[in-house]
Image (cartoon, rainbow, N blue to C red):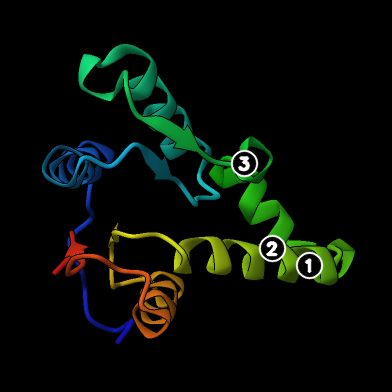
């Protein structure tokens, strides 16, 4: 399915979709799982400056956020990575995401789909997913 061209979803669209869930379902915390530094900083800025997010906690691990140059460099040096640490972080994120009560994400990502399927299978979800890229 990676051969299908999907529309690029902006951070603003993700935030608008997440706010729909926060507002309607009265969610008090948002878990952000991303390795993209630009996404992280945009979301962090929104939570700091947009009044609609002031009563909502942002849960994330800043150490995971890297820019695209760093990600490309890490990929080219994959033999230098601690694959055990990398896999452990991925599994931790999946388990955290699987415990969430609501899902806002893109199904163009195998990782996001797996996290949703785990949450669904565990019975964590309290509402249907809000999928932004379909």
Q: Which residue is mark 3?
A: 61
Q: Which mark is residue 86?
A: none
Image position of 73 (left or right of 130):
right
Residue under the image location 23 percent in, 45 percent down: 18
Q: Residues within 10 Å of mark 1 (few under 14, many from 20)?
A: few
Residue under the image location 29 percent in, 59 percent down: 102
Q: CA distance from mark 3 to mark 1?
A: 21 Å
Q: Nearer the viewer, mark 3 or mark 2?
A: 3
Residue under the image location 18 percent in, 65 percent down: 127
Residue under the image location 57 percent in, 40 percent down: 67
Q: Nearer the viewer, mark 3 or mark 1?
A: 3
Q: Are marks 3 and 1 in contact (CB under 8 Å)?
A: no
Quarter of the image holding residue 51?
top left
Image position of 123 (left or right of 36):
left
Q: Residues within 10 Å of mark 2 (few under 14, many from 20)?
A: few
Q: Which residue is mark 2?
A: 75
Name the N-terminal-most of marks 3 and 2.
3
Secondary structure, mark 2, is: helix
Q: Which residue is mark 1?
A: 78
Name the N-terminal-most of marks 3 and 1.
3
The quarter of the image holding the N terminus is bottom left
Q: CA distance from mark 2 to mark 1?
A: 5 Å
Foreground residue among 60 and 81: 60
Q: Are marks 3 and 2 in contact (CB under 8 Å)?
A: no
Relative image position of residue 58 (x, y in whole percent): 45, 33
Q: Are marks 2 and 1 in contact (CB under 8 Å)?
A: yes
From this view, report whether residue 102 is shown above or below residue 125.
above
From this view, report whether residue 49 is shown above or below residue 109.
above
Relative image position of residue 9 (x, y in whole percent): 22, 52
């Amino acid at each position: 399915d990676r051969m299908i061209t999907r529309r690029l979803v902006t951070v603003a669209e993700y935030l608008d979709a997440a706010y729909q869930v926060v507002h309607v379902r009265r969610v008090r915390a948002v878990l952000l799982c991303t390795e993209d530094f630009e996404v992280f900083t945009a979301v962090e800025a929104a939570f700091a400056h947009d009044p609609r997010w002031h009563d909502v906690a942002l849960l994330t691990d800043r150490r995971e956020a890297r820019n695209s140059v760093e990600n490309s460099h890490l990929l080219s040096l994959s033999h230098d990575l601690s694959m055990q640490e990398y896999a452990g972080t991925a599994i931790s994120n999946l388990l955290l995401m699987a415990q969430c009560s609501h899902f806002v994400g893109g199904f163009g990502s195998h990782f996001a789909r797996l996290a949703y399927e785990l949450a669904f299978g565990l019975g964590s979800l309290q509402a249907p997913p809000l999928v932004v890229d379909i």
